Every structure is written in structure tokens, then in C-alpha cells.
Image (tube, rainbow, N blue to C red):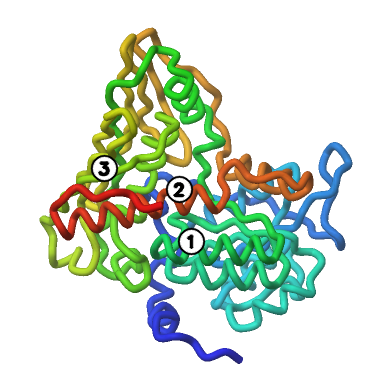
Amino acid sequence: MKQLSNKRRDFMKTISLSLGALALAPDAFSSLSSQTQVWSPGGRQSASGGKKLGIALVGLGTYSRDQLGPSLLQTEHCYLAGIVTGTPEKAEVWSEKYGIPQKNIYNYHNFDEIAGNPDIDIVYVVLPVFMHKEFTIRAAKAGKHVICEKPMAMNSAECVEMIDACRNANRLLSIGYRLHFEPYNIEMMRLGQKKIMGNLTSVEAENGFKLLDPNVWRLKKNLAGGGALMDAGVYAIQGARYTTGMEPIAVTAKEEKTRPDIFSEVDETIRFKLEFPGGLIADCRTSFNMDLNKLRATAAGGWFEIAPAYSYSGQKGKTSGGPMNFKQVKQQALQMDDFARCVLTNEKSRVPGEEGLRDMRVIDAIYRSVKTGRRELVGK
């Protein structure tokens, strides 16, 4: 049995303190579905008769419980085949609810044995950030395709290691950027990238929520890597990037802290500017102490925005020409289905590991700017 690292030992001590909690905001969660998924050897067939790929969720915190598990009851190309958890009580509950056989249940120590399990094709890493690299690499070495939750890793160097490991194992890697499958955010991409209203002149992106429990793992730097910027700010970075269709070349940033008693280890609020080629500036803000949820762009011939923009549901949008009107979707189901389809057809995901790496390079630059007080170039 492998010895736990110091960080992993610290995590096991705090696992009861909201493992896998808030990915965006506490009021975004839905109740756990009462449906039960019936497991059958070799996976299940889709409605069209094709094979459904088996997914194992690594980490059974709130996001897995309230979003990913129920979403896997709605997917066409994949299903919940296995689980990985350090809590036996959770394993028992999930096994009963989703009909998961004992042979498809693993813990963090025997995880590598998953290599010999043909029921599991894809591993979804839903753990605190400091564990993302380890379990992505272990999953790839076990011959499994990988989805890793955002933020991808503790820093860009870890992202490179993860990408290399999956490439060397000839496995696909995707990051859990569900909003690339959400209609209102897709419309922001279309309007901005296609210049439907002309050249963009400004972008505003902000995301945040109030996280004031001092015991949650997201407030521990050695577990989360950072604070609001890592957890919520990555959505603002994403929004600015996919609305413009460009990569930021430089950043300037400033941290604001009003509750040092709670945010002693990580950032509470950061305001930052992303500088894009041609001089376009995106004004961004993220916080663990304010409710923020907007993506807006102004162009030469009009404007368009969504607010709320980044929640699990309930997106609303409008433009200078009138309202947006799209159907609400189950974002996580579409995200996981698309990756399963990519595995089945050997196509690259629209949100591959490289997408997470690009965001992490921006995050690294923002933290450098906070520290130096200067404009910092985004690394390549």
C-alpha cells in the first residue's frame, strides 16, 4: 500500500469538511435524483443501439453527488460504471442507489487496479486540486481516458505533466468545462468570434460567491492552490477567452482582502485585466465574498451579455437587438456525452487538456501580477 503524502494526509483529515463542495455557488445545486441505474456486464446500450462507455467518478463530494451522478442517468453515450472514494459509507450509498457492483468500487489506495476492469473506460477526477495531477496520471497509466475537473492543476507545470502522461498512454484528456455545451455561452462565442456586431471594443467577465466557512478545503492553499481565482475566476477567464476567440498576452491584477481571518491562506477577491492582441481589454473580477455572475461584450455595432452566466442552470441573456432565448440543458450530461463520443470516434475533445493549460498560464500570470504589482506577460 502506498504511503500518503503530507498533503494527502492533511486532506484525509479534512475530508469531512466539504470534499467536492461548491464548484460555483451553493444555491446552484439540485437534489439527488431518486432514479436507480441498473448495471449490466459490459456496459449498457444507447437508445440507438451503440455501446455506452463506463465512467468511474473519483471523489464523491457534492459536485459528484448532486450533478455528475444524476447527469449520468441522462447520458446517451456513457453511464456510471464505477466509483472511487476514501469513505466506505459513501460507497455503500452509491452502490445501492446506482446499482454499482462491488468489483467496480475502489479507494485511493487500490485505484491502480482499475487497469484490469473492462467495465470502466473513462475516469472522471473530481477531487481537490492538489490531487488532480496524481490521479489523472495514474488513470492514464491504467489505460483509462480522463476527464479532470477545473481548475486543471495547481499550476501550469503540472498541466504539462498531465497532458504528456495522457499523450504517452494514448488516452484522451478533457477538462470539465461544461459551459462549452451550454447554449447561452455558445451564443456568446458565436457573437464574439464571428463578429456578428462588429469588432469587440470591451469585455466584462466576473464570477464569485460567498464562501465564509473557514473549514472548507477550498480555503486551504496546499489543497486548492489558491482561492477565488482558481475556483470561480477560471470561469471569467474562460468567458473572456471564448467570447473573443483570442488568447490574452498580458495581465494586470490587484487583490482585495476584507476578511483576513477567513482568507488567511488564499485570495478573497481579485480584480484583473486581460490584454488581448490588438489592444482589446477584458475587465474581470472574482471573489469568495461577493455574488458575481456576468459575461458581457460590447462591439462596434451593439452589445450582448448573459447573467447569470456560469451557473449550473438558469442562464439568461440579452443583446442590444433583443433577448436571447435558448432551452435550458443539463450541462454536465452534454459535456460527458460529448467526451464519450470523442472516445468512441477517436476525436479530440473540444475542451482538451490544452484548454486547461491555457487558463492555468493566465492564472499563473495573474498571481505574479498580484505579487509584483506590475503588468505580467502570459507564459507559453
Label 1 CA crowd tier, 10 Å (few <14, some 14–19, many 20+): many
Q: Nearer the viewer, mark 2 or mark 1?
A: 1
Expressed as whole percent of the image width and height from the top left, the position of residue 352 reads: 57, 49
Q: Which residue is mark 3?
A: 291
Which residue type does callout 2 highlight? Phe
Q: Residue furthest left?
A: 258
Nearest to the observer: residue 177 or residue 251: 251
Q: Which residue is mark 2?
A: 29
Q: Is residue 95 left or right of residue 12?
A: right
Residue 98 appears in the rendering: no
Residue at left 11%, top 56%? 258
Q: Earlier in the sequence, mark 2 or mark 1?
A: 2
Where residue 179 appears, as percent x and y from the top left, is 50, 38
N-terminal of the pair, mark 1 or mark 3, is 1
Q: Nearer the viewer, mark 1 or mark 3?
A: 1
Q: Is residue 61 left or right of residue 348?
A: left
Q: Nearer the viewer, residue 155 or 136?
A: 155
On the image, numbered disc 1 is attached to which residue? 159
State the image coordinates of residue 180 (x, y, percent, origin top left): 53, 37
Quarter of the image that includes the N terminus: bottom right
Amino acid at dot 3: Asp
Q: Residue at x 55, y 64 (%)?
A: 162
Which numbered mark, 3 or 2, is in the foreground of this view? 3
Q: Please report contact status of discs 3 and 2: CB closer than 8 Å, yes or no.
A: no
Q: Amino acid at mark 1?
A: Cys
Which residue is depicted at the point 30% across and 70% down?
220
> Who's the residue at 74% across and 54% down the image?
37
- Measure the C-alpha gap from mark 1 to mark 3: 29 Å
Spatial distance from mark 2 to mark 1, Cα to Cα? 28 Å
